[in-house]
Amino acid sequence: MADRWYRDGLRFECTQCGACCTGAPGYVWVTREESETLARLLDLHVDDFRRRFMRRVGNRYALIERANGDCIFWDRQIGCTVYRARPTQCRTYPFWPENLRSRRAWDEVESECPGSGKGKLYRLEQIERIRRGEGETGG
């Protein structure tokens, strides 16, 4: 772990700008447990939630998007409408393995995300936990 290029830590503070929630189509992967948590938050039966807000992609499930590529739960006025129950993929951004593979990959994240490279310093151990889905970023 000491050989990681980010061994001195990385800064991140979510500005809730929505850059990671909007734009080009993509996938927000959702586990069974996460869909149950989201359904509870929205006071929906889990089957209703899955029919309304999820799609099957191969053998996995993802949240649906609006026609413009925005996450179905992103509201341009108030931000993430399910923030308290957001999926692991959202909780761990920007410390995804593909963003940490090199300094160049991280520089690309910093160019797209106004909170990357600023704010709270996450130590190596914290980043590794978050990267594995065992923690989350604040925001």
Image (spheres, rainbow, N blue to C red):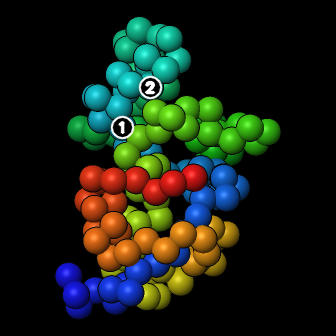
Question: Residue 102 appears at what percent x and percent y?
Answer: 38, 85
- Label 2, on which residue? 38
Which mark lies nearer to you, 1 or 2? 2
At label 1, which amino acid type do we have? Val
Question: Residue 63 appears at what percent x and percent y?
Answer: 46, 36
Describe residue 101's horizontal placement relative to residue 111 as left or right. left
x 23%, y 91%: residue: 3
Describe residue 112's horizontal placement relative to residue 124 as left or right. right
Disc 2, SS: helix
Are the residues flagged by discs 1 and 2 in contact, CB closer than 8 Å? yes
Give above or below for 96 relative to 41.
below
Say how many tags the image has.
2
- Label 1, on which residue? 30
Quadrant in the picture for the N terminus:
bottom left
At label 2, which amino acid type do we have? Leu
Q: Residue furthest right?
A: 77
Describe residue 114's horizontal placement relative to residue 95 as left or right. right
Question: Residue 106 appears at what percent x and percent y?
Answer: 48, 80
x 61%, y 75%: residue: 118
10 Å crowding of disc 2: few (<14), some (14-19), many (20+): many
Give above or below for 74 relative to 95.
above
